[in-house]
Amino acid sequence: MVNTSPSPMLIGHRGACGWRPEHSTGAYRLAFAQGVDAVEPDIVVSRDGVLVVRHECEIGSTTDIAQRPEFASYRTTKTIDGETLTGWFAEDLTWEQLSQLRCIERLPHIRTANTAYDGIEPLLRLSDLLQLTAAESAKHGTEFNLVIELKHVSYLASQGYDLPRLLCDELLEGGWHLTPERVIIECFELTALQALKRMGAPYQLIFLLEHEGHPADDASHSYTWYRSDAGLAYLRHNVAGISVDKQTLLQSQQSATTAGAVSPAKAAPHQAALANLAKTHGLQLYTWTLRPENEFLEPLNRSSEPAAAFGNWQQEWRDVLATGVDAVFVDHPALFREMLSEAI
């Protein structure tokens, strides 16, 4: 879907996870109530091939599994995409086992108030979220969209799971192929998106780019190269757009403005270097993640208060909007809507 609104598409990042544990039913319901355009579930898989809504394969930091002695023997160490992790992994447990777990706050040192909801709500399958999104769309009289992120596709393929195929099958079963304009699929691995394209998946595809390093499925090209003119020229034949971290977006804007800003009038065309370059190649540009806490703000926007306190998030978010970005991932959707209303 192409965003034609003067403001960017507002995506509830893992729901409204600034106020509820991420990927919980409560987080998604709150995001819908706060007026998002879309919500973003991350997708991993259970041992028996069920698509599960979790931030990562490792679930020790987002569920109460560490407090469940019956699952103690499943704790193990794995290397995923070059990172060694010790904990509990979704692909080692069946859905029946995973369904016994409850969501907890991933960032308790920052979002202490959210821990009041720890241990209450069960994990969601993607099928559960599809049904919830349909129900909430009917309730609020609007068609909410989905921005689905496939996680660790190459790693899970090595374990015997074809995530792109499983996702297409799930969306087909849920009837979402009938309204493909409401579905966006994103991934840090271009080969996964190319696989979806070869399958004839009718959904919009977005390539996620980290600030540094290279994709897990392509050591020959860095993320920096993919953001270059040559990289974007290549991507335009594969995806509808790219999604970058806000540090990359803001640094691109600052560098271009510094290079060309002899006067405010002359600086204007340079304010959105990456956004302009992406649009030159017919690509949309998304950015993640807008958060108000000092911990996550750029240094200039942090206050002298503790890491969990809100800094000058309004200025940072206005700077993001000034780049002309097409979509934003936000943990606190109501704050974003509040900022937009104040600007009118």
Image (spheres, grey):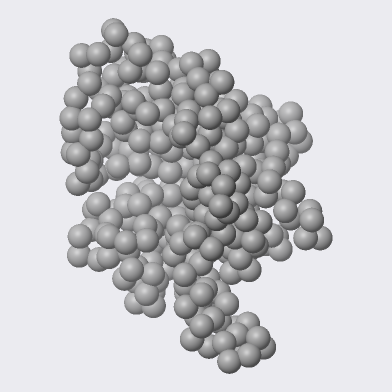
Find the residue positioned furthest to the bottom: 262
Q: Is residue 339 above or below residue 75?
A: below
> Along the line of sight, which residue is nearer the eye, 14 or 297?
297
Give how far across and how far down residue 145 sits, in percent.
60, 43
Direction from residue 169 to residue 113 in the image, left or right: right
The residue sitting at 27% across, 65% down in the picture is 222
Q: Is residue 89 visible?
A: yes
Q: Is residue 118 above or below residue 282?
A: above
The residue sitting at 23% across, 58% down in the picture is 218
The residue sitting at 43% across, 38% down in the picture is 42
Find the residue positioned furthest to the front: 304
> Along the line of sight, which residue is nearer the eye, 175 or 104?
104
Q: Quadrant of residue 257?
A: bottom right
What is the number of callouts on the image? 0
Give how far across and how far down residue 323 sits, in percent.
59, 69
> Along the line of sight, which residue is nearer the eye, 46 or 27?
27
* Image quadrant occupied by the C terminus: bottom right
Give how far across and how far down residue 73 sits, in percent.
20, 14
* Image quadrant occupied by the N terminus: bottom right
The residue sitting at 47% across, 22% down in the picture is 103
Give how far across and how far down residue 207 sits, in percent.
40, 57
Find the residue positioned furthest to the top: 70
Q: Is residue 330 visible?
A: no
Q: Quadrant of residue 66?
A: top left
